[in-house]
Amino acid sequence: MSTAEPTPSPIPKRPASPKSQGTETQNPLRDENQGYDTSRPHPKPSYPRPKLRLRIEDLSHSGSSTFLSNCNASTALSSAVESVLSTLYLPTRSNSHIPGTRSVTVILEPLGGVAYTTGTQLDDDHKEIHFSLDYINQILEDRKVKEIQGVLVHEMVHCWQWNAKGTCPGGLIEGIADYVRLRAGLDPPHWKRPTKGKDEDASAHRWDAGYEKTGFFLDWLEDEHGEGTVRRINAFLRENEYDEKRFWKALFGENVEGLWKRYFDTWKKEDDTT
């Protein structure tokens, strides 16, 4: 990585006063649609539309009927793509800042765990989401619809997010996926923001524990520093390899340990007042 690359300005904290109307100044891609004749109508930029497929490996498995009776695959997959792209990106005329995923195939099959996402052997632009029929089969009745959709959204993030050229820590990768799920209103009831006992502090926990723990941290950053904060994190992961000190300092002007402590202390204060 060249040391001549410009360092982005840190994301400022959200001002106390209401945010003024206007264009988003923090988006590094804000100028892509500028520079052409605005006197004539132009089509509004839209997000990519990948080909979406569903494959069921075992129709006799009870998880298959559970999935089909609680999920309209066509609308569910399209909705998952929309949730991911609208959270992580702003559309432009070229959409060159968005990964070139051309198709996503959801494969329902018996397997351990919940789900995982991978590229195909021939072309990484074609993604596969492997979703466990065994897991689907054991979801509680009143949670089936939201849990299936929540898992689809989480895994769909892995089809579209940037990973710092393969150097991004897994905790941040999974945290971004659960952040998008959280923002889509699909967080399950067992997810909890941090609560602290009298002798606990932020050092007893890790910001990069992943999944909902990191997802809630990213959600706090979005609220603290304003809309588009996680979008900018993802954009930084497109162009740069991950170096923890440089990454957080460049984006927020301080190290991640300081951010994590402030996040943790925010919830400690709320605990103390309840």
Image (tube, rainbow, N blue to C red):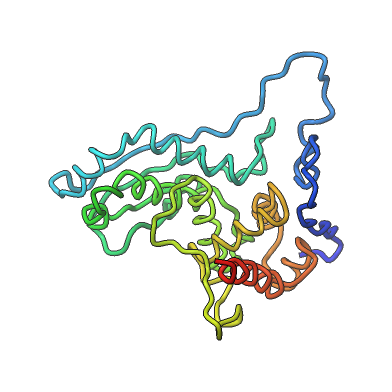
Residue occupying the point 35% across, 57% down: 115
Position of the C terminus by quadrant: bottom right
- Whether residue 167 appears in this view of the structure is no
Q: On the picture, is 128 further left or further right than 161?
A: left
Residue occupying the point 80% across, 56% down: 12
Q: Nearer the viewer, residue 157 or 69?
A: 69
Q: Is residue 28 above or below residue 111?
A: above
The image shows residue 101 at horizontal and vertical percentages of: 52, 43
Total marks in image: 0
- Whether residue 71 appears in this view of the structure is yes
In the displayed image of the protein, which residue is found farthest to the front?
274
Q: Is residue 73 above or below residue 130?
A: above
The image shows residue 109 at horizontal and vertical percentages of: 25, 52
Determine the image quadrant of residue 38.
top right
Position of the N terminus by quadrant: bottom right
Q: On the picture, is 130 further left or further right than 179?
A: left
Residue occupying the point 49% across, 53% down: 158
In the displayed image of the protein, which residue is found farthest to the left?
60
